[in-house]
């Protein structure tokens, strides 16, 4: 890892807090041993410090702090999709909150109210919830992801959670797991019996966006190298171009990323690719401008969508999508599912020539793509 590399963003963490009831758990001790960082005990149901009192201004400092604690809520729940737009029926496995990376557009800045990184160590409860859901409803197929409220692999060097999850999902008949990341942290994925049921996914963007707007994230080279390594281990892959951002020379930028992707990654290894244009709630714009005054991504023309999020005007979204989708159409495997995240039937029809309902809906399209990879 080079001097300026953020391939493993967990190196940004310099302090750990531990909830008292968790300190003697073997898993907690494993994490502390791997991290080899100073730690402080926190009373049960307490908080590490008062950084949350000035949440926005302390968010960068909070990202250097890891809080190991119990999850007293649910680990496993449906994705909070957006009404009026096509949702993919994803199931979220909530392993923690926040991450050491700092994307200018990250919704978590406006969604969370605590600046530190939280990771839940009571994993027995996590697996019990998975057992209850997967075994109770055995005829249902579950697409599960850990990347809704945190990056799936950003702190995996410390937690090693991926190894437990991949081994568990590898034994299930009715589920696949997607690990979504902007890091290059894939060392724990070697030597596991994944049985084709774990999909390792990367968010990709135009190189200039990755460099300037995705702070402390892996470079395009590092992400593609990690993806190539996972493909050699037999994992299926996914890529998410979300958010697609209108910026100077955007055509050249997205062309470079897509060309590189298919030069380095076998097309037949890719299960799905998602597309989604920049969108945000009003409070995120205020926070983003305050924290990242150098960024210009919020200073464009937007319209309020049906979900009350700011979006590019429809003609602009169609222009972005059509260009990028046309690049993919010439390169993808016929088995790869390309889909929009939170877009209307009208956008689907205008860009792709069909609405999801014509193919059974987005969940059915993604289920089929996932199942084809291990029901061979």
Image (spheres, helix red, strand yellow):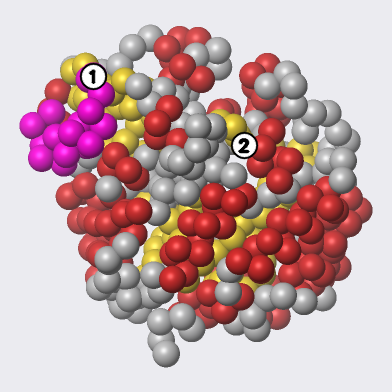
Vertical arrangement, residue 36 with respect to residue 232, above or below: above
Nearest the viewer among 188 and 93 is: 188
Q: Position of residue 209 (x, y in %)?
A: 71, 40
Around disc 2, counting alpha carbons within 10 Å, would you say few (fewer than 14), some (14 to 19), or many (20 or more)? some
In the rendered image, residue 25 lying in the magenta stretch gets the answer yes
Disc marking residue 38: 1
Q: From where the camera sits, is residue 86 visible? A: no
Q: From where the camera sits, is residue 29 visible? A: yes
**Res. 339 image quadrant:** bottom right
Name the side, left or right, on which 111 lies relative to 376: right
- Mark 1 lies on a secondary structure that is loop
In the rendered image, residue 274 lying in the magenta stretch gets the answer no
Point out the stretch of residues depicted in magenta.
23-39
Vertical arrangement, residue 283 with respect to residue 362, above or below: above
The residue lying at 22 percent from left, 25 percent from top is 18
Q: Quadrant of the C terminus?
A: bottom left
The residue lying at 79 percent from left, 50 percent from top is 253
The residue lying at 67 percent from left, 37 percent from top is 211
Q: Measure how far apart labels 2 and 1 are at the Cα level.
A: 28 Å
Q: Which residue is mark 2?
A: 214
Q: Position of residue 302 (x, y in %)?
A: 84, 37
Name the side, left or right, on which 147 lies relative to 168: right
- Mark 2 lies on a secondary structure that is strand
């Amino acid at each position: 890892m080079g001097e300026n590399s953020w391939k493993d963003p967990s190196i940004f963490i310099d302090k750990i807090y531990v909830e008292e009831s968790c300190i003697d758990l073997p898993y907690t001790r494993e994490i502390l041993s791997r991290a080899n960082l100073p730690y402080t005990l926190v009373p049960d149901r307490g908080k590490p410090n008062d950084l949350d009192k000035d949440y926005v201004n302390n968010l960068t400092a909070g990202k250097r702090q890891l809080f190991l604690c119990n999850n007293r809520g649910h680990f496993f729940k449906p994705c909070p999709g957006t009404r009026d737009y096509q949702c993919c029926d994803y199931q979220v496995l909530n392993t923690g909150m926040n991450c050491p990376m700092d994307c200018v557009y990250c919704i978590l800045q406006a969604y969370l109210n605590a600046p530190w990184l939280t990771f839940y160590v009571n994993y027995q409860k996590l697996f019990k919830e998975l057992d209850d859901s997967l075994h109770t409803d055995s005829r249902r197929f579950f697409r599960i992801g850990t990347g809704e409220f945190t990056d799936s692999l950003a702190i995996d060097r410390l937690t090693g959670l991926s190894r437990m999850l991949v081994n568990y999902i590898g034994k299930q008949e009715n589920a696949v797991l997607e690990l979504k990341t902007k890091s290059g942290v894939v060392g724990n994925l070697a030597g596991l019996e994944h049985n084709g049921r774990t999909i390792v996914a990367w968010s990709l963007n135009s190189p200039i966006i990755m460099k300037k707007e995705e702070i402390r994230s892996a470079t395009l080279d590092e992400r593609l190298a990690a993806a190539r390594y996972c493909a050699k281990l037999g994992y299926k892959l996914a890529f998410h171009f979300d958010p697609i951002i209108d910026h100077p020379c955007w055509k050249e930028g997205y062309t470079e990323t897509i060309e590189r992707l298919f030069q380095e990654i076998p097309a037949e290894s890719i299960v799905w690719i998602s597309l989604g244009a920049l969108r945000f709630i009003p409070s995120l714009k205020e926070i983003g401008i305050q924290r990242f005054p150098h960024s210009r991504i919020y200073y464009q023309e937007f319209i309020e969508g049906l979900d009350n999020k700011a979006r590019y005007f429809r003609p602009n979204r169609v222009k972005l999508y059509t260009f990028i989708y046309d690049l993919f159409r010439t390169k993808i495997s016929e088995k790869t599912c390309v889909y929009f995240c939170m877009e209307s039937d009208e956008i689907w029809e205008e860009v792709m020539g069909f609405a999801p309902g014509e193919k059974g809906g987005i969940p059915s399209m993604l289920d089929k793509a996932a199942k084809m990879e291990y029901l061979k």
